[in-house]
Image: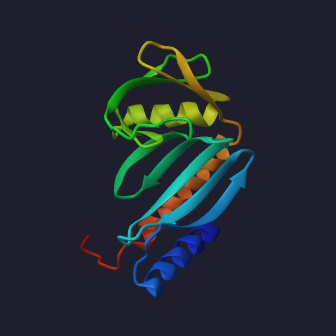
Amino acid sequence: MARGVFAGAVMVAGLVAAQGGMADPVSERLFTHKHWMVEIVGFDDGSFSCVAQVSDGDDTFSVWADPWNPVKLQFYSTSWDFSDGGSADLGVQVDRRSPWSLSDAELYQNSVLFNLPEGDASTRFLMEVVGGSTLHLSNDSGSKVQSYSLAGSSASIRALTECVDALADEGDGNPFN
């Protein structure tokens, strides 16, 4: 798998270099399993990120990762409109485990965005996602807003990790960074 992910990272990097930048993100699907997919995404500033995403119609739950930034969770729905921006305190629960608090999650257009803190808590959260069957997003009063299937998340998070590792191996060619 890593060789395929690495080839995808190199291909997207080559596309960006050939275009001399781009207006919209360029992505390549690296892996699909059940309702999940993993892509590498190249942005117009020359940066890259990997994303593992599960979709249910117009609603998605995504885990964004790269070697240089915190892991970011994104919850997206076409039925949401956060054009005024802001933030919210939310809850996320995997199956019937104890809920996780997402304090000050960013509200942006149709998305709720949250950076996972570095360390053991993030690892524990991702391990719950890998081992779970359903993730529930709740508002600050505990009412469920949306649920997402985690079937296929184990293989998809593994593919996400391989994508991030490939990006780290690719680096920027500067051995001092």
Along the line of sight, the residue nearer the viewer: 60 or 12: 60
Question: How far from the left and from the top, in percent, is residue 53?
Answer: 59, 47
Tell which residue pokes out farthest to the right in this image. 34
The residue shown at (39%, 58%) is 67
Question: How far from the left and from the top, in percent, is residue 2?
Answer: 60, 65
Q: Is residue 99 above or below residue 124?
A: above
Q: Work out whether residue 161 can be spotted.
A: yes
Question: Which quarter of the image is occupied by the N terminus?
Answer: bottom right
Q: How many marks?
A: 0
The residue shown at (75%, 45%) is 34
Q: Work out whether residue 115 can be spotted.
A: no
In this image, 90 relative to 104: left or right? right
Question: Which quarter of the image is occupied by the C terminus?
Answer: bottom left
Residue 151: image quadrant is: top right
The residue shown at (67%, 58%) is 31
Question: How far from the left and from the top, in percent, is residue 120?
Answer: 39, 34
In this image, 2 relative to 82: left or right? right
Q: Is residue 11 above or below residue 27?
A: below
Question: How far from the left and from the top, in percent, is residue 79?
Answer: 56, 36
In this image, 17 relative to 30: left or right? left
Q: Is residue 160 above or below residue 115?
A: below
Tell which residue pokes out farthest to the bottom in this image. 18
